[in-house]
């Protein structure tokens, strides 16, 4: 029979392991934009990946907000079965020069609302596609998102993401922008280029890891990290057990 001290140590180890695993799962469940980067001046197909974090409710509405300080003159959405799509355009505070003309209004948000009987269920994720461009000459673009659940809970993914800083609790989906090639026009080069808007000869296209590869890589890294933490916790528990056993023997 195990002593009461041994049982306490085992219970502590089990609870700690469960907490570590749960924390790792929660940390990965962010609304993200894929690809993670694109070229300034070009067009890109963006996929907003929306995982369901709730264990009891489904996601029934997703809103993505678009920047108006660096507006995008072209924003096109891909139809999504089972979801109603609402596009909102807003007047700009002042005209913005885009190419040969001045832009006076731009898309400020797109909202996907689930039809009756449709939702992103617990344990599931879904993806929503848009094509945008031309991308501005800035370091990054943030797309704050609002996720609404069937139980009325609303989660705002709007915290600013700063390079080199710790990731916030609710980071806004952020697209990093690379300077365009000096010899090119910035169209169609780099991850996420939208071939339908700016076709590129096959010889110019660069191989880029697809979204599944990125997700698999992230998942593997998190799994390995979690496994390391679990091994460490179990090792501490065994060391404590050995220490208590040795002390009891010496006392005897």
Image: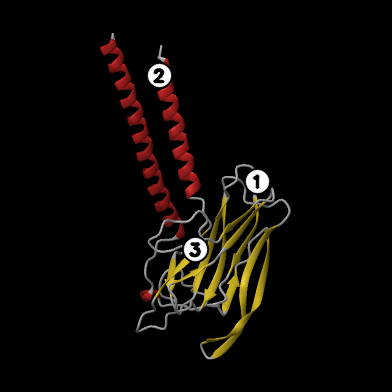
Q: Residue at x 35, y 84 (%)?
A: 183
**Crowdedness near tag 1: few (<14), some (14–19) or many (≥20) residues, C-alpha within 10 Å:** some
- Please tell me the numbered disc located at residue 5: 2
Asked whether disc 2 touches disc 1, contact meaning CB atoms under 8 Å apart, the reply is no
Mark 3 to mark 1 CA distance (whole Å): 27 Å
- Vertical arrangement, residue 102 with respect to residue 83, above or below: below
Quick one: which residue is furthest to the left in this view?
250
Please state the horizontal and vertical placement of residue 54, each as a whole percent of the image. 60, 46
Give the quarter of the figure containing the C terminus: top left
Mark 2 to mark 3 CA distance (whole Å): 47 Å
Q: Residue at x 44, y 33 (%)?
A: 16
- Vertical arrangement, residue 11 with respect to residue 49, above or below: above
* Secondary structure category for the residue under label 3: loop
Q: Is residue 135 left or right of residue 59?
A: left
Please state the horizontal and vertical placement of residue 93, each as a whole percent of the image. 61, 82
Q: Is residue 32 left or right of residue 105?
A: left
**Crowdedness near tag 2: few (<14), some (14–19) or many (≥20) residues, C-alpha within 10 Å:** few
- Vertical arrangement, residue 118 with respect to residue 17, above or below: below
Asked whether disc 3 touches disc 1, contact meaning CB atoms under 8 Å apart, the reply is no
Asked whether disc 2 touches disc 3, contact meaning CB atoms under 8 Å apart, the reply is no
Q: Earlier in the sequence, mark 2 or mark 3?
A: 2
Q: Earlier in the sequence, mark 2 or mark 1?
A: 2
State the residue position of label 3: 160
| Residue 82 lies in quadrant | bottom right
Q: Earlier in the sequence, mark 3 or mark 1?
A: 1
State the residue position of label 1: 57
Choose between 202 and 212: the one closer to the eye.
212
Here the colouring is: secondary structure
| Residue 249 lies in quadrant | top left
């Amino acid at each position: 029979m195990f002593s009461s001290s041994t049982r306490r140590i085992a219970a502590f180890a089990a609870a700690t392991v469960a907490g570590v695993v749960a924390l790792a799962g929660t940390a990965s469940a962010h609304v993200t934009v894929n690809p993670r980067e694109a070229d300034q001046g070009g067009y890109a197909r963006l996929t907003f990946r929306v995982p369901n974090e709730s264990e009891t409710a489904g996601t029934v509405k997703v809103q993505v907000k678009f920047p108006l300080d660096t507006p995008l003159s072209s924003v096109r959405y891909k139809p999504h079965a089972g979801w109603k799509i609402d596009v909102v355009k807003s007047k700009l505070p002042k005209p913005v020069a885009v190419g040969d003309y001045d832009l006076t209004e731009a898309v400020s948000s797109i909202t996907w609302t689930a039809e009756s009987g449709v939702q992103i269920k617990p344990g599931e994720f879904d993806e929503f596609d848009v094509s945008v461009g031309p991308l501005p000459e800035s370091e990054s673009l943030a797309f704050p998102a609002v996720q609404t659940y069937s139980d009325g809970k609303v989660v705002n993914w709007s915290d600013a993401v700063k390079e080199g800083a710790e990731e916030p609790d609710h980071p806004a989906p952020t697209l990093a922008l690379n300077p365009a090639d000096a010899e090119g026009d910035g169209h169609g080069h780099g991850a996420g280029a939208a071939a339908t808007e700016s076709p590129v000869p096959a010889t110019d296209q660069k191989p880029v890891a697809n979204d599944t590869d990125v997700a698999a890589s992230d998942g593997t890294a998190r799994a390995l990290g979690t496994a390391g933490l679990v091994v460490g916790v179990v090792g501490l528990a065994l060391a404590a057990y050995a220490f208590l056993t040795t002390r009891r023997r010496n006392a005897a």
